[in-house]
């Protein structure tokens, strides 16, 4: 397992210098943020990112994300050109040593919350999703971190209506076409493509979402028979639906060799199905992080992992969900659990003994 940390480039107040001081963090997860969605990333921009990160003493092996243009998801307009651009981005990233590319197939909206700075009982601020509040929101006038804010209200209305008309099966059809186009390139380049689940894992604003549960993930993985075709398994996305047994899913898909990247955070599920993002510690939310990490560990997970969204604590301000302090605490909490699991693993002792005997 390699512990990584999300970084949003030179404008991120959480600098590489600060991240480097978190014990055990080896890799940076980032992207090119100044190129329009669907266009080819400049080679010099990718190389510059890698140099900055390497100069700071860390690796750049995970890119999150290479966004999928809405035309591809809807199967209309310039979708074929955008798919060709996507293939070229895979090639260019592979050339710079990138091993895993994260993406999602969420229509219009990325992760969605009703409030970005809800004050919890301990005085920290967290992202929350209250269903009653979300139902009152006007999606044509919303803006959240991670969303494409370039759409006018009229364009947003048209997009939402187009997805409603497309429906779930139409979205599945377009996802399958996209996967079968890009995966031969990813396999040739030795890159793992890791789809991120929908967040939250249910339809919002009347538009479909499909990467939401075990049944649908099974269907997704069956679209292309190659280990490179895999997952970014996110506890905070899948785990906010009580019907999803995230630990079992982690074990199942890791054993299949399809989990290339893992996002870990805790959430507190409320009685009506709403949820609040919580500190990573198991007792702070509804997810048992020891059980989750043990599932990965027992299944032999050797991919990338990172603390996902964190609260704002100790007076910190910045990009909602992506402050330094709480995510750093989450990384250390997970590394502590993983180290304990390593030391309690009899299989690991057997491997060490064999290696020592071989050397002798």
Image: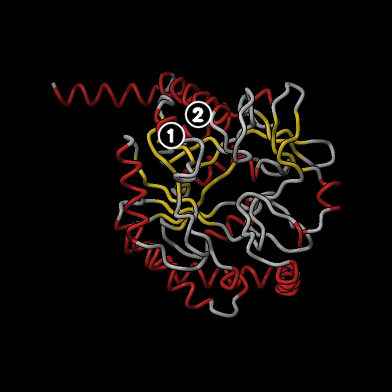
Measuring 52% from the left and 58% from the top, which residue is drawn there?
Answer: 221
The label shown at residue 54 is none
- Taking the image as shown, residue 164 lies to the left or right of residue 322, namely right
**Which residue is painted at 73% across and 33% down in the image?**
268
Of residues 319 and 259, the one nearer the viewer is 319
Callout 2 crowding tier (Cα within 10 Å): few <14, some 14–19, many ≥20: many
**Between 250 and 306, the one nearer to me in the picture:** 306
Q: Which residue is mark 2?
A: 331
Residue 313 appears left or right of 158: left
Q: Position of residue 264 (x, y in %)?
A: 56, 36
**Helix, strand or loop status at disc 1:** strand
Which residue is at the front of the view, 159 or 216?
Answer: 159
The quarter of the displayed image where residue 343 is located: top left
> Of 301 and 152, which appears nearest the observer?
152
Determine which residue is flagged by label 1: 3
Residue extending furthest bottom? 77
- Residue at the location (60% across, 69% down)? 70
């Amino acid at each position: 397992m390699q512990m990584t940390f999300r970084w949003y480039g030179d404008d991120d107040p959480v600098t590489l210098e600060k991240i480097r001081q978190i014990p055990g963090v080896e890799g940076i997860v980032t992207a090119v943020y100044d190129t329009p969605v669907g266009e080819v990333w400049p080679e010099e921009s990718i190389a510059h990112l890698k140099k900055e990160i390497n100069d700071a003493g860390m690796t750049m092996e995970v890119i999150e994300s290479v966004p999928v243009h809405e035309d591809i998801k809807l199967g209309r307009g310039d979708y074929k050109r955008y798919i060709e651009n996507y293939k070229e981005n895979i090639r260019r990233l592979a050339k710079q040593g990138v091993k895993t590319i994260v993406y999602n197939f969420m229509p219009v909206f990325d992760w969605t919350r009703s409030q970005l700075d809800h004050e919890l009982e301990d005085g920290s601020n967290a992202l929350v999703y209250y269903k009653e509040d979300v139902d009152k929101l006007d999606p044509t006038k919303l803006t959240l971190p991670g969303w494409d804010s370039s759409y006018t209200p009229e364009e947003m209305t048209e997009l939402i209506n187009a997805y409603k008309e497309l429906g779930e099966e139409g979205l599945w059809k377009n996802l399958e076409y996209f996967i079968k186009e890009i995966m031969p390139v990813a396999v040739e380049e030795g890159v793992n493509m890791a789809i991120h689940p929908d967040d939250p894992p249910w339809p919002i604003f009347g538009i479909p979402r499909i990467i939401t549960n075990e049944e649908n993930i099974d269907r997704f993985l069956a679209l292309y028979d190659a280990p490179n075709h895999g997952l970014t398994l996110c506890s905070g996305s899948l785990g906010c639906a009580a019907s999803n047994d995230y630990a079992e899913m982690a074990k199942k898909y890791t054993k299949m060799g399809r989990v290339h990247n893992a996002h870990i955070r805790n959430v507190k599920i409320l009685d009506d199905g709403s949820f609040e993002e919580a500190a990573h510690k198991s007792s702070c939310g509804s997810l048992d992080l020891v059980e989750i990490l043990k599932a990965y560990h027992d299944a032999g997970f050797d991919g990338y992992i990172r603390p996902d969204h964190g609260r704002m604590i100790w007076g910190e301000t910045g990009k909602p969900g992506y402050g330094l302090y709480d995510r750093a605490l989450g990384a250390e909490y997970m590394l502590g659990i993983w180290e304990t699991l390593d030391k309690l693993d009899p299989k690991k002792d057997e491997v060490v003994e064999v290696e020592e005997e071989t050397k002798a």
